[in-house]
Image (tube, rainbow, N blue to C red):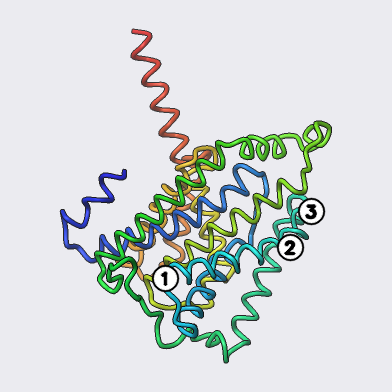
Amino acid sequence: AFAVLAVLPLLTDSRVLSDYVIRLSAFAIFATSLNILVGYGGMVSFGHAMFFGGGAYAFGLLMQKAGTSVPMGMLGAIVFAALLALAVGAICVRLKEIYFAFLTLAFQMLLYSVILSWISLTGGDQGLMGGIPRPPFLGIDLGQDRNLYWFSAAVAVLCLLAMRLVLQSPFGYTLRMVRDNADRARFLGIDVWRVKLYAFVLSGVFASIGGVLLALFVSGAYPDFSYWTMSGEAVFMIMLGGIHVFAGPALGAGLLLLFNDLVSRFTEYHGLALGIIVLLFALGFRRGIADFIGHAYRRATTGRRSQ
């Protein structure tokens, strides 16, 4: 996968393909960060887009108003998302299941309302007007599409590797223990609330990085980034790809973006057609496509060994 990402711009000058990979980089991070909560923590969030959109706006405002560099803008977005996740998570992780899900949705819609109403800062329903500048990063001109492609792909790879390492660490195993049996974890002396809060903050931080990449790509930040439909798309992505395989959400992100592009091109009934496609895939691959592929591969490998 790393080799393909590195050489793809050298093999083709397709603007469509380049744009697709940049968007995929943003949404792969976003969906995988949500799966830290859903798949590994057992916490279904309907408001994850508050960090995605919040990171995009924080980055855009720092770049527009303060004229910061790209790394400092990203750092500011990460700090904002971490503080927001800490405040929201301290309340939400005390609740269970549907109460947790809808309270995260409520906080997301609160942020969405602030974005719409604070017109002097956010631009209201028009988003950040004037575009987000793309100053050089380490001597690389991010204004060029190919350079932005490499930058986005590199950030996505680093973020996915970081999340993978965290989930394979002792913290990741503790998080899964809390997911499977919180009472047993408490009996063993684990602070369940703190573990869930750490996971909530971690997922929010990575989601904000995805928002930064999308803001760089579209050269702006818009209220839709923090709307409930954006959270819904992330949920669809992990359903398509599968929550039980680490690469599942990234695969689901790629598929949903592809379906979205194809449906928009060939029919005017975009929402209906996309909904039917997602429903069929959800019914056909109930544990996700990545889990189905992994199971088929293991079965084929076992069959060869038995022969």
Could you tell me if the residues under marks 3 and 2 are in contact, i.e. CB atoms within 8 Å?
yes
Residue nearer the viewer, 225 or 161: 161
Q: Position of residue 139 (x, y in %)?
A: 28, 68
Residue nearer the viewer, 194 or 211: 194
Up-down relation of residue 266 to residue 130 (above or below): above
Q: Position of residue 10 (x, y in %)?
A: 17, 55
Density class for disc 1 (Cα within 10 Å; few <14, some 14-19, many ≥20) is many
* N-terminal-most mark, 3 or 1: 1
Residue at mark 1: 70
Q: Amino acid at mark 2?
A: Leu
Q: Is residue 118 left or right of residue 146?
A: right
Give the number of the mark in front: 3 or 1.
1
Density class for disc 3 (Cα within 10 Å; few <14, some 14-19, many ≥20) is some
State the image quarter where residue 215 is shown: bottom left
Whole-angstrom CA distance, mark 2 to mark 1, is 33 Å
Residue sitting at 37 percent across and 19 percent down? 301
Q: Amino acid at mark 1?
A: Val
Give the number of the mark in front: 2 or 1.
1
Q: Position of residue 258 (x, y in %)?
A: 35, 57
Residue at mark 3: 95
Residue at mark 2: 103
